[in-house]
Amino acid sequence: MIQNSTRRERIIYLDVLRVLAIFMVILMHAGDPYLWDAATKTFGPECSFYCALLRPCVPLFIIMSSILLLPIKTDTTTFFKRRFLRVVVPFLLWSIIYVFLPTPSKIVFGGPENAFTDSGMNVIAYNLMMIPISFTGTNVHFWFIYTIIGLYLFMPIISPWIQQASKKALVVFLMVWAVTLFYPYIRQWFPQLHGECDWNEFGMLYYFSGYLGYIVLGYFLHKYNSLSSAKSMLIGMFLFAVGLALTYKGFLLDEQRFLCKLNISGVEDWKLLEHSIGNLTINVVLMTSGLFLFFQKLSIPKFLQPIIIELSVFSYAIFLVHYIFNLWVCHSLASLMNLNPGLEQFIIAVIIFVCSYLIVKLISFIPKSKYLIG
């Protein structure tokens, strides 16, 4: 999610992907009122489709970070200093802001459970304490920033290898990583595999798994995609369509599993809904790769490029602030409009995106605003 330096030649297709990815995130969050109707115990079909359609948003950010930062061209200290100022400081400041931000509903405990969740601790003190540890109910949308920061910490280690690695070596890594992308489905039959057990979570392919694969994938596609524009876009559309079909079908099945468990036990097991739409599944990787290949060779009209670059430069800041509007705008507008739910969700996302950009633009005129907006 790091913006290119203004002194660096723009890679316009990355600017396009960054703007697309941030809008996808906002569109996803704008669906909060539409996914689940607790009164009728039904899922919104339009929002369910959006849940599948928008899955590549987070992987795209990771892929773009890989392309912009690898191989590292500065010393390690400079690299970490820049990442700290541009990403970590705004993240920490906004995490604090969200703790004290007025919300339409009561602030509650949220995020992963831990020893303090049921301790009776003051909720504000709890949320402040948790910022360096994990996300909470106040900054739940920041969950993947912790992951990206972890990837930044690893980049100086992987940079020398990725710089000298041959195309074949990168392909081998990606092939092994691809095997791990089937794990979420294999674990339905074998919950623990390749040496995993109650006392060992680090199985055989553990070190080839996770979001690091997107780092290598982004570098590989950026460097070695020699396809013509037409072929790259055609293959991209095909991969995206296949991935979307698998993701959407899987998500509908997961909804049925959720409803079945709810009817039998009365338990709303939301983890069941994360199975087929997980970022580290083969279907989501197909969607992400497809989008990347399509936009990598897409010709962008010159007159649109200044607008895209402007939005791209502020994309991280838009992400940081958008949830304020998501909290206050989503439920208010959802109760006022009487349109198709899918159209309503899209309109709300556009409003949040525009409002977030305008606020960020105003903040940018404040001295030292880089500490707030990156």
Image (tube, helix red, strand yellow):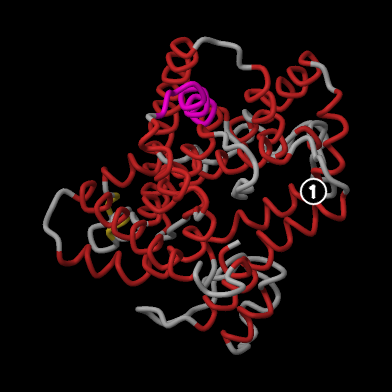
Q: Nearer the viewer, residue 142 or 320?
A: 320
Quarter holding residue 332? bottom left
Instruction: Please rate how many residues cluster around mark 1, counting C-alpha atoms within 10 Å: few if below 14, some from 14 to 19, many from 20.
Output: few
The residue drawn where x is 42% and y is 20% is 237
Q: Is residue 262 above or below residue 99?
A: above
- Position in image of residue 366 (x %, y %): 52, 74
Q: How many marks?
A: 1
Q: Which residues are magenta?
A: 287-300
The residue under label 1 is which amino acid type? Asp
Q: Position of residue 73 (x, y in %)?
A: 81, 40
The image shows residue 349, relative to residue 241, as above or below, that is: below
Q: Which residue is mark 1?
A: 198
Task: Kindly indicate the quadrant of the structure image that contains residue 356.
Answer: bottom left
- Residue extending furthest toward the left: 338
Q: Is residue 299 magenta?
A: yes
In the foreground, 187 or 262: 187
Q: Measuring 48% from the left and 71% from the top, which residue is drawn there?
A: 363
- Residue 199 lies left or right of residue 144; in this view the side is right
Q: Position of residue 75 (x, y in %)?
A: 88, 48
Residue 130 included in the magenta stretch of the image = no
Q: Is residue 78 above or below residue 102?
A: above
From the viewer's perspective, is residue 195 above or below residue 324? above
Compared across the picture, whether 85 is left or right of 202 comes to: left
Front-lying residue, 104 or 22: 22
